[in-house]
Amino acid sequence: MKKIITLTMTIVLLLVMTLSLAGCGGDESATADPVSLVDVTTEQGISLKLPSDLAKQDNGAYANMETGDNAGFGVTEIAGAPLSSATEEDVVALYQSKYDDVVVTSFENGIQINGKEALVSQVNLTTPGGHAITLTLVMVTDDTNNYIGTFIYGKDKTDGALYKNLQACIDSITIAGTPDSTAASAQVGTSVKDDLSEYLYNNFGTVFEPEDRDIIETYEEAILTGDSENFAKALSDTLPAKNNALLEKLKAYTPQTTEVQELHNLFIQAIELRKDAYTQLVVVMAKQSTEAEIDAAFVLLDEYEAKIDEFLTKGESMKKDLGV
């Protein structure tokens, strides 16, 4: 439980800080907009419903800065004892060293949340800032990772949306591998280094780059013939077909991490710019074009080359930083 406890404590400290700040301002008597439950997928790959009055914060938590209601999330690889071995005493020990008046009001382990083993415990405690809060700890495991959620509201604030909808929020939790998980969930447990290696050596290097090189060679060969009709045919038929086929493969590929997805997006943007440039060149060659129209076509080619350079530079930088 040590690794789980350490991460959970970090999350709780962040949430308590948010609660303390929230309690310093805001007009609770102001007329509030109606609150509903909305679907949220956290950065850790946890999908659930949360009250719409909880806004995402810079630290990844969701909070209502007027009422202090908030929810925070984390994920850690399973290490040591399994979640099923956790006890009520573990929960008490988790909070007692940092907070006052710790009372566990409920504890359930070995329950199921959408087909996954889970622990749910509710605790009343007083923060170092003197705030009496109710904290609900939820841990869900998929035998690889433990996913952690903490839901906090003021002990005396039982009229808030989080208090009223807490059970619905907990019941809605799904994690990576469950039917309702999203693409973000697939990122859990995959390192950027592994994802970049998979992308560069098993996809870009073996599929995307060879097809891209073939397109470039076809374009250059058409120019070198010195035959305008042959060049026009390549621009209107051969090159668009090859470019579109490559774009389909690029858009069908989904990296497992945000960092590699951003790199991949640069390559997609470059190929789309080249497609637009070829289209513009066809237009230019089909009529008596102005100098501005001709320049516009070559500006697109310049933008394509600049985007390719950006992609290659970023890729090399990531390879160096990650040791790929």
Image: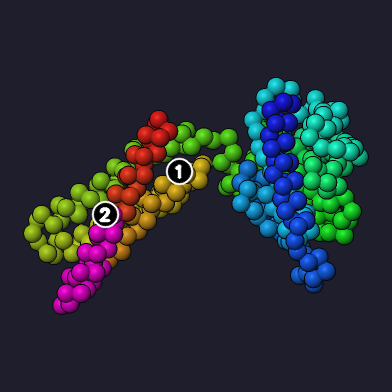
Q: Quadrant of residue 136?
A: top right
Across and down, in percent, residue 131 comes to 83, 48
Labels 1 and 2: the sequence-earlier one: 1
**Magenta stretch: dominant secondary structure:** helix
- On screen, residue 211 versus residue 10, left or right, reads left
User: Please, which colouring scheme is shown?
Assistant: rainbow
Circle 2 residues within 10 Å: few <14, some 14–19, many ≥20: some
* Residue found at the very far top of the displayed protein: 80
Pointer 1: what residue?
Answer: 260
Pointer 2: what residue?
Answer: 305
Q: Which residues are magenta?
A: 280-306
Q: Secondary structure at mark 2?
A: helix
Is residue 245 visible in this depiction of the protein? no
Across and down, in percent, residue 175 comes to 68, 42
Residue plotted at (47% across, 33% down): 194
Instruction: Determine whether 166 is above or below 318 in the image.
Output: below
- In 3D space, how far apart are the residues under numbered discs 1 and 2 (Cα atoms)? 20 Å
Residue plotted at (29% across, 42% down): 210
